[in-house]
Amino acid sequence: MGLKIWLGQGLVDEKDAVISVFDRSLLYGDGVFEGIRVYSGKVFELKAHLDRLYESASVIRLPIGMTQEQMSQAIETTVKANAIQDGYIRLIVTRGIGDLGLDPFVCKNGKVIVIADNVKLYPEEFYEAGMKVISASTIRNHPMALPPQIKSLNYLNNILAKIEAVEAGHGEAIMYNHLGYVAEATGDNIFIVKGGTVQTPPIQAGSLDGITRRVVIRLAKEDGMCVVEKNLTRFDLYTADEMFLTGTAAEVIGVVEMDGRVIGNGKPGPITKRLRSLFFQAAHS
Ligand code: PMP
């Protein structure tokens, strides 16, 4: 039996959840999306995800055609219909069916798709031993050309960097911006720890305003840690005491090697572990 998918106005069987070849998400990557976790039957940070989705949609002039309240209902309905206790929601709003031209205004209303499924995680040993990453040669999109806050359906910039990671035999690649400063990983935000201070690049460096990033910054501050958002260079990463990535799917995951250099003592560090455990508590509270 397949999944029940929310498509447009209600649930349909997975086999019937199809969209047109004229859909602008296919033709142009014209739409926005969110990845959201369900922990113990509860949707994690739903409000923050919806705010981000509606902001992304508003910037690209995409009318969602549903209030946030109706969207929450659609998500709850989809999660329940698929009996998801611990899982992952992919929420997509495509601009819908247009003609073959670029003009977005021929489409009057976006189409909402909600998929609730089991989550695909990094292997457990990545969390215990830490991940190895590389520096991507693919430069992150210029933030003034495509604001990184827009979580759009066009991920080719990230996919080009992900190709580099996979071909190097690693799970993630770190992307730099046009000025050479660290931006983020292909699907996660990046943090380092240096001399007890938790550091992460500012959004303006070209990073998505990650919800996990926000939660981790809040938890770190509540725990008395010093957190600074500042431009980081490749040198800062190589000489960090600890490095970790944050994201909805990855949660908090330590990085122990980058471009062949050992980070810290080659094991996920104490602050990484502490933040991972605080995140786990927050997610399951
Ligand atoms: N950066 C990029 C490019 C992403 O796609 C994501 C989400 N997978 C993140 C960072 C992490 O964001 P969040 O914590 O909201 O999942």
Image (tube, grey):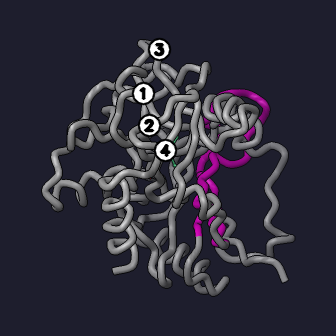
Q: Which of marks 4 and 2 is in front?
A: 2
Instruction: Report the quarter where the N terminus lies.
Output: bottom right
The residue stretch that appears in magenta = 88-117
Q: In this view, does 202 lie to the left or right of 68?
A: left
Magenta-drawn stretch contains 105: yes
Could you give the CA–CA distance between mark 4 and mark 2, rounded to whole angstroms? 7 Å
Q: Residues within 10 Å of mark 1 (few under 14, many from 20)?
A: some
> Which numbered dot is residue 178?
3
- The residue beneath circle 4 is 255
Q: Distance between the residues labelled 1 and 2?
A: 6 Å
Query: Is residue 238 positioned above or below 242 on the image?
Result: above
- Image spot of residue 191 (x, y percent): 37, 41
- Location of the C terminus by quadrant is bottom left
Which numbered disc, 3 or 1, marks the residue closer to the eye?
1
Amino acid type at mark 2: Ile
- Determine contact: label 4, label 2, CB under 8 Å: yes
Q: Where is residue 26 in the image (x, y as percent from the top left)?
A: 76, 42
Circle on res. 263: 2
Extreme-top residue of the structure: 179
What residue is at 40 percent from the left and 29 percent from the top? 237
Disc 1 to disc 2: CB gap under 8 Å: yes
Between circles 3 and 4, the one closer to the viewer is 4
**Among the two numbered marks 1 and 4 on one chain, the one whose residue lies closer to the N terminus:** 1
